[in-house]
Image (tube, rainbow, N blue to C red):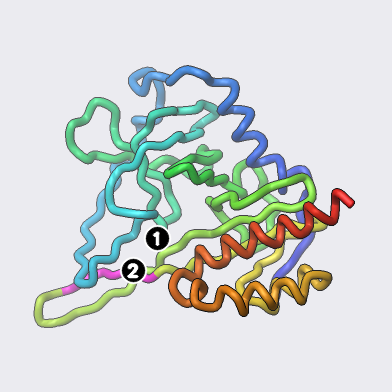
Amino acid sequence: MLLLTACNFYHCYSQEQALQNLYNAFDSTIGYQNLGINNGTIHINNDRSDNKTNRYYLKDSYLPGIAVYDGQVYRESKLKYDLSKDILIVKVYGESNNTGIELIPEKTAGFEIDAKKFVNLSYGTPKLPAFISGFYEVVTGTPELQFYIKHHKEHLESINDRGKFTNYQTQNSFVVCYKNEYRLINSQSDFTRVFPDYLKEIDNFYQINREDKRKDPTQFMRNLLIYTGSLLAKDYKQ
């Protein structure tokens, strides 16, 4: 069933706008040694996988990125995003090994990895729909419409003659904030309920890109979100 509830319009668009404003305000890299980003819980991962899966966004290694933490912007950071726990991990400054610190989610406004921006929709906003929590990739955003991807990996325990293993399965979901409402949109019927004026276009998109949906469901949905946004933008200009 499609979940929806009223959301504050300012919050819908302002989270990613606030991140951009912070990026613009801090043009130089802030030294890690002078700030509290190095203080926190050490990230420990004892997972053993027998199918080469892991808990992280993209891969199990630190990636260059930007973190917005406790009101400060940290450029040239080395980051991991744990999709199982929904936490951001930063490589400790000055360490030659892979020691990482788990950043406190309530203090993390957002971050950027691999040119993808993530915003904490829960940041500073106590009243949200029950299905909104933590970090979301910003797919596209205008004052009228915002699309988000919730990246998540579910852990699966297994035991065989070689021991105990923890494997991961991708379980992403998709959110739109449209007409001041947050809505989950995980299927074609969800899309057409939210955007009934584009039923034909959405149906055609599903038909044409059926193979893409099978190979990479998340990228398919990302493309559909962008396509739907372009249809709305075209109508707004008319």
Residue positioned 40% across, 49% down in the render: 81
Q: Is 142 on the left-hand or right-hand side of 153?
A: right
SS at badge 2: strand
Q: Quadrant of residue 94?
A: top left
Residue positioned 48% across, 59% down in the render: 151
Nearest to the observer: residue 73 or residue 39: 73
Residue positioned 72% across, 44% down in the render: 13
* Any part of residue 1 in sight: no
Q: Mark 2 points at which residue?
A: 168
Residue positioned 66% across, 77% down in the render: 188
Q: Is 237 on the left-hand or right-hand side of 222?
A: right
Nearest to the observer: residue 168 or residue 42: 168
Q: Is 71 on the left-hand or right-hand side of 95?
A: right
Query: Residue 102: within the magenta?
Result: no
Identify the magenta region. Answer: 164-169
Residue lying at the far left in this picture: please name it: 162
Could you say where residue 218 lies in the image, as x and y percent from the top left? 50, 65
Residue 213 is labelled as none
Q: Name the residue under label 1.
A: 84
Q: Say if 159 sits above or below 27 in the image.
A: below
Evaluate if marks 2 and 1 touch, with contact meaning CB atoms under 8 Å apart. yes
Mark 2 residue type = Tyr
